[in-house]
Amino acid sequence: MAEESGKSFARRDKLLGIESEVQKWWAEGDVFRADPKESVPKPGEKFFGNFPFPYMNGYLHLGHAFSLSKLEFAAAYHRLRGANVLLPFAFHCTGMPIKASADKLLREIDGFGNPPIFPVVKEETAEPEVKPEAENEGNQTAPGGKFKGKKSKAVAKSGGAKFQWEIMQSYGLTDEEIAKFTNPYHWLTFFPPLAVEDLKSFGLGCDWRRTFITTDMNPYFDSFVRWQFRKLKAMEKIVKDLRYTIYSPLDGQPCADHDRASGEGVLPQEYTLIKMEVVPPFPAKMSVLEGKKVYLAAATLRPETMYGQTNAWVLPEGKYGAFEISDTEVFILTRRAALNLAYQRLSRIAEQPTCLVELTGQDIIGLPLRSPLAFNDMIYALPMLSVLTEKGTGIVTSVPSDSPDDYMALQDLKSKPAFRAKFGVKDEWVLPFEIIPIINHPDFGDKSAERICIEKKIKSQNEREKLDEAKKIIYKGGFYEGTMIVGNYAGMKVQEAKSLIRSKLLESNEAVSYSEPEKKVMSRSGDECVVALTDQWYIIYGEQEWKKLAEECLANMNLYSDETRHGFEHTLSWLNQWACSRNFGLGTRIPWDEDFLVESLSDSTIYMAYYTVCHLLQKGDMYGNDTSSLKPEQLTDEVWDFVFCGGPYPKSSDISSSLLNQMKQEFEYWYPFDLRVSGKDLIQNHLTFCIYNHTAIFPTNLWPRGFRCNGHIMLNSEKMSKSTGNFRTLRQAIEEFSADATRFSLADAGDGMDDANFVFDTANAAILRLTKELSWMQEVLAAEDSLRSGPPSTYADKVFDSEINIAVKMTEKNYGDYMFREALKTGFYDLQAARDEYRLSCGVEGMNRSLLWRFMDVQTRLIAPICPHYSEHVWREILKKEGFVIKAGLPGADFPDLVLKKANKYLQDSIVSMRKLLQKQVSGSKKGNANILNSQNKPNTGLIFVNEQYDGWKKECLIILQRNYDSVTCKFAPDQEVISELQRSAIGQEGNFKQIQKLCMPFLRFKKDEVMAVGIQALDLKLPFGEIEVLRTNSDLIRRQLGLDNVQILSAEDPGVIQRAGPHASLLRQNPPSPGNPTAIFLNE
C-alpha cells in the first residue's frame, strides 16, 4: 500500500486472509467447473466468454488484468444471474519473441560470460529528434530539429534494462535460474504455471481443466492447428505467392505485428522509383562508376507529375552511396533504401547491398541528369535542407508547378545568390528553369503551387505550417479533381492517368517498384525491419467473397460501441493477404511445408473452439502430456470435422464413440462464444482474423456473437511503463492492495475505448471501504435486538426500500451492458449513500431490522462480480447463508417507486437549501445589517411555507410553454411565437401588454432553461406528490437536521398565513413559495 501505517497494512492483510480462505472454499466446491446441460441452451441460459491468451515471455501485468477484468466481471454477472458460465484461459507461446530472447541470452553468455559481466554504457546522449512530415515524395521535413535527451540505443523496455539478462533479473530471478532460459522451452514450463497462480489469486472464475499452451510442445493443440490449416488450404484460403512484407533481416523472416518491439500495424508503403540518369562524364570522386549506367533513384508517390521536373533535391550533409543494382546499373541513394531494395531482388547480390563509393549530398549537387518524362532535356541535382534520409531514398524529384515545397525551395535558390554560393550551385543549374504547367487544378489553375503560395503569402521554404496546409489543399484537389494537360494522357483525370503513367514507366524500365515500411519498425530481436519481396504462404484476407462473409458476421455482432464497429469496418476495408508462415521461432509446422512454422497471429483465430474439448483430450494437463484419454495421432481431420463442422461420423477412427459424441456435444452446447474481450489494438489483426476464420470454417449459426474492446490502462494518470517504474505486475498489485481492492480499482478505471486510469488511491480507499463495511455489518448484527422489528413502515423505510430496488434494477442493467464502472456506482457507492441517508433519517425510531438484512443481502450480491472474495466471506461468515454467493442469483426487487424517489430528492434538496438559509441568517449579511439575527439569539422555530400548484399568470405561462414545446426535437418554438400566444391569452388581454410581458418574460426564460436542465416535468403545474405531506411527515427529520426546537409546515393558500411570518412577511412576499421551492422563515419564539 501507498500508506506505511500498521493499521493500513492490517486492513489490507485482513482482505488477503479472506481471499486465501475463500479461494480454498471455491477449490473445494469446484465452483467454476463448467459442464454442458443435456439440452441445447435457450438464449441467456449459457455464457461462453474468452480472452486473447497472453504471451508467456514474462509475468502477467495490470494491462492484462484490466482487459481480463471486463470478461471476468461479465462472466461473474452471468454466473450470479443463474447462467451456465464457461470462462477458460490458455497461454500463447507461438512465434519468435521467446526464441529471440533465449538466443539473446546465449549471445550474452558467449560475449560476457556466465553470469555475464556487462560493460558500463553511457545512459544519456543528446540526439536531434526529427519529426518527419507526410510529404508527397516521402522524405522531406522542416530543416533542423530539437534536441532531446535519449537513452542509449540498446536500452530495453524493462526498467531501463539494456540486456536480456538484466530483464530477467528484474523478474527477481537468480543468475543460476536465468541460465536455464537459454532453452526456449524452459520459458514454456516456467511462466504459464506462475500465471495460473496469479490468476487464481486474482479470483478469476476459470475452469482450469481447459487450460493449455500453444506450439508443438502440446501435441493436441498442434493437431488442432494443423487441421485448421489443412482445411483453409483445401478451401483455397491459403496460397503461396510473391508479396511485399515487413521483414526482419536479423531473424531472416517476415515480422508480423506480434513479432515487433515497435511499429505494430505498420504496412509496406509502395513507391515508384524514378531512374534519373547521371550524364557522363562523372566527377573524379565517382570515376569508379565509369562504364556503368548510374541513376539518382528518387522515390515518388506521384509519377504522373514527372513531366514538370525542373531539378532533383538532395540533402547536402546527407550520407549516400552508389549501390550496384545489377552488373550494369548503379543507383545513388541512402544505404537504408539500398537495404530495402536488396530484399526486393534489386541488388547485384541478394540481400547484400554493394556500395561502390560512398558519397555525401554535396558530392551529388550539380550532377546533370536526364529524367523520364521530363520536358527539360537536362536538369541538375540541387540542395534542399529539409530532405529526409530516413524516408524514401534521400533523393527527391522537384515539380514546382504542383508542389508548394518545390516551388518555394526553387524560388529561394533563384533569389538568393549567397545561398547558391554556399553550396557551389552555378546559376545555369537554376536560373533558366521555369515552372512547367502539367495539371489543371479546379481551384488554382495550371500553376497551382505558385498561386497558393502567393495567396497564402508564403515567403520562404522554412514556413512549414503554411506549406503543409498548402500542400494538402493542392495535392487533394489536384489528384481527385485535377486534369492532365500534357503528355499522352492529356485531358484525362489525374487519378485515372496515374496508374497508366506508372505502368508505362515500369514497362520502359525508366522506373522500378520500391517499398519500405510506412514508419520505422523494430523487431523483438532488436533490428530495424525492411520490406522484402518474399515467396511464402499467405492467407487471402480481403478476397471479395470472403470479405462479404466477414462483413455479414460483423453486422450481426454486438460490439458495444460505435467506435469499435468503425475500427472493424476500417480494418476490413484495407486488410489484404497476410503472411502466415515463419521459419524461426516456436509453433506448429505448416502441415504440407514443414520447413515453415505457422506464425503467431494465425494459430490463434479459432482456438476458442478448442476450449470446448480441451479438458477431454488433455485431462487438465496444460502441456498435453497425459495421453490416457486418447493419443494425439488419433485426432484425424475426419475427427475434427465431425466434432466442429458437422461432418460424418469418422468410422475409421478408433476413438470410442462415447468420447467422440461427448466432444461434439460439448462443442455444440457452448458454441458460438458469446463474448470475447480484448484491447482495441487487436482490432486491426487478431480480432478481424478471428471473424474471417470463423466464417470460413464454421456455419453461420456458430459465428462469434460479440466482441468488447477497451483502451489501454494508465497508472495514476500516466502511461504504464517499466522504464519509468510506473508499472505493476498482477502479482505485485495483489500483494500491495489485495485482489478485491485491485478488482475494485480496475472496475472504477473506466469502460470505454479511451485509455482508462488505475488509481492507487482508489485501491487504497477500497481497502478502507470494504473493511469498514465488514465492521459495520458485524456491529449491526451484534446490536440486532435494538433494531426496530416488523415490516418497513415509516417514510424513511419506504424511501430506503425503494432505493434498494432502484440499485438492483440499475446495477443489473449496467452489468448487462458491461458498464462495470456504472455498476460499481449504482451497486455500491449509491447503495451505501442510501444506507447512510437512511441512518440519518430514522431518528429515535431507529432502523428497521428486516430492511437492514435486505440491504446487506443485496449489497453483497451486487458487488460480488467485482469483489467476490469479500462477498463470499460476508455471505458465509456474517450473513450465515448457505451455498456460494457467486451463484446465489440476483436479488429480487419490486419496480422502483420513482415518485417516492422524486419526493425524497425534493425533501433532501429542501433541507440543504433551508440549512444554507439558516446559516446565512445566523451569521448575518456581509453588510452587517443590525436587524439580522446573530448566534446570541439563534432562531428556534422554522416556518416552511408551501405552494403546491402554480396559478394565475404563472399557470397561464406554463400552459403556453407546454403547447410550444416539441417533445421529439426537445426544442421550444421561437420566442416570437410564444410572445404572440401570450398576447392572445386571457392574461395578455387584461391590461398593458408591455407590462404583462415584462412580468412574464423572466419566468418564461427561467422555465425554458429549467426544461433544458431537468426535462419537460419542469412545466408541470404541480409536483407528482404532495409537498405538504412529505414535509409534515418528515418534520422531525427537518427539525433535527436544522437544529430547531419546532418546525411548522404551512400552506401559502391558507387565509392570513402570511401574517405568521411576523416581521419577516416582506421576505415571504419577495420570495413566495412555488411548486418544488418552499420558502422558509426562521424565528426566535
Image (spheres, helix red, strand yellow):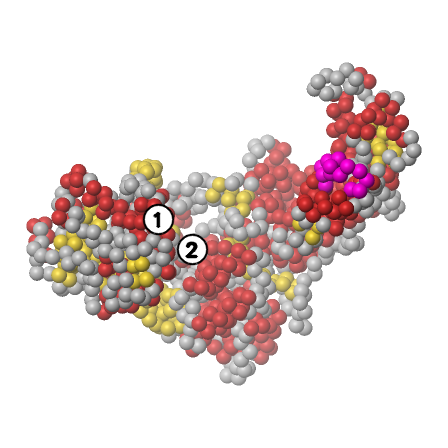
User: In the image, what residue occupies the spot 15% across and 40% down?
Assistant: 421
Q: Dot 2, how many residues are within 10 Å of its Cα: few (below 14), some (14-19), or many (20+)?
A: many
**Taking 786 as reference, is 859 above or below it?**
below
993, 876: nearer the viewer = 993
Mark 1 is surrounded, within 10 Å at the Cα level, by few (under 14), some (14 to 19) or many (20 or more) other residues, namely: many
- Helix, strand or loop at label 2? It is helix
What main secondary structure does the magenta stretch of the protein show? helix
Q: Label 1 amino acid?
A: Ala
**Camera-nearest label, 2 or 1:** 1
Left or right: residue 806 compared with residue 175: right
Looking at the image, which is closer to me, 890 or 135?
Answer: 135
Q: For the residues marked 2 and 1, what is the alpha-carbon distance in whole angstroms?
A: 54 Å
Q: Is 463 located above or below residue 535 in the figure?
A: above
Q: Is residue 449 above or below residue 938?
A: below
Query: Which quadrant of the rendered structure holds the N terminus?
Result: top right
Instruction: Look at the image and say whether residue 992 sits in the magenta stretch.
Output: yes
Image spot of residue 482 (x, y percent): 34, 60
Q: Is residue 757 left or right of residue 109?
A: right
Q: Amino acid at mark 2?
A: Trp
Left or right of 685, for residue 367:
left
Viewer-proximal residue among 979 and 833? 979
Does the magenta segment cover residue 43?
Answer: no
Residue 968 seen in the current view? yes
Q: Residue at x 51, y 68 (%)?
A: 551
Q: Residue 586 occupies which quadrant of the picture?
A: bottom left
Q: Which residue is mark 1?
A: 470
Residue matched to label 2: 187
Q: Which residues are magenta?
A: 988-1004
- Considering depth in this image, is 197 or 792 the residue closer to the camera? 792
Residue sticking out furthest to the bottom: 651
Occupied quadrant, residue 584: bottom left
